[in-house]
Image (cartoon, helix red, strand yellow):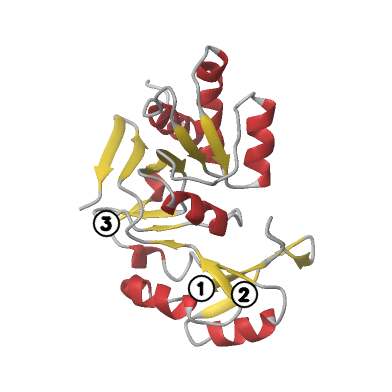
Amino acid sequence: MARVESGDEQKRRAAERAAELVEDGMSVGLGSGTTAELFVRALAPRVAAGLRLRCVATSGRTELLANQLGIPLVDLSAQLDLAVDGADAIERGTLAAIKGRGGALTREKIVAQASGRFVLVGDGSKLVERLSDVSPSMPVPVEALQFGWRMTRLRLAALGDPILRERGGAPFVTDNGNVVIDLYSSPLDRAADLAVSISGIPGVVDHGLFLDIASLALIAEPGGILELRRV
C-alpha cells in the first residue's frame, strides 16, 4: 500500500519548487509562516554553496531564521526580483489570496508589491474556487493601530464580525507594534470592494486581502506540483 504524503511534506515540495526559481544575484523577499520558512530552508544549502542573494525578511521570525541559516539580509530600499510566501487561501484563476494568520500581513504586502514577481506556495488545502468559499469560517486579518482600536473595530462591524486577536489573554501585537482584528463573515464575493472599504477606515494599517499581486501559485498535490498563473 502506497504511503500517504502528509500536508507538511506537500508544503515542503512546493517550497523546494519555489526555491528553484531563485537565480544567482537575485534580490528576494522572504515570506512568513511555516510554508515560507520551508522556502527559506530550501535556499540555505545553495547559499552555503555560493549562491549570491540579497534578501528581505517580512517578519522578525523569518529574519531570525535567515540569520541562523546564513542567508544575507538587507533593508528594503529598491525593487526586488522575486518574493515567495504562503497563504491561508488562494483563489484559482485570479490568485487572489487571504494572508495574515501569522500577523505579518503588512510587511508581507509591502514586500510582495515591491517585487517584480510574487509567488504563492502551499498545498491543495489552500486552493479554493472562490475566496467566498471560505467565508464565514476564515477571517480577513486587519492590522490596526493600537490607538483607538475599539473605534476601528466598531467601524469594521459594518463589514462583518470583527474580533480582536489575542495571545495568552492579551492582545496580539505585530512586529510593527499594532493589533490584529480578524474580520469574520465579510462579503468575500466582492473582495475588491471589501478591500477598499476596509482601507478607508481610520486606524486601519492594512488588510490580508492580496488582490492582483501574485503572478504564480505553486500548489503541491499528491501527483506533483500544480503551477497556476493569474488570468
Q: Mark 3, mark 2: which one is toward the viewer? A: 3
Q: Quadrant of residue 64?
A: top right
The vertical placement of 7 against 58, above or below, is above
- Can residue 135 be seen from the camera position used here? yes
Which of the two discs, 3 and 2, labels the residue nearer the N terminus? 3
The vertical placement of 32 against 143, above or below, is above
Q: Which of the labelled discs sits on residue 82, or is there none?
A: none
Q: Residue furthest front?
A: 77
Residue linked to disc 3: 94
Identify residue type, mark 2: Ile
Percent x, y for residue 17?
A: 38, 28
Q: Secondary structure at mark 2?
A: strand
Q: Are marks 1 and 3 in contact (CB under 8 Å)?
A: no
Q: Are marks 1 and 2 in contact (CB under 8 Å)?
A: yes
Q: Secondary structure at mark 3?
A: loop
The vertical placement of 195 against 92, above or below, is below
Residue linked to disc 1: 184
Q: Residue at x 49, y 62 (%)?
A: 208
Who is closer to the viewer here, 180 or 147? Answer: 147
Q: Mark 1, mark 3: which one is toward the viewer? A: 3
Residue linked to disc 2: 163
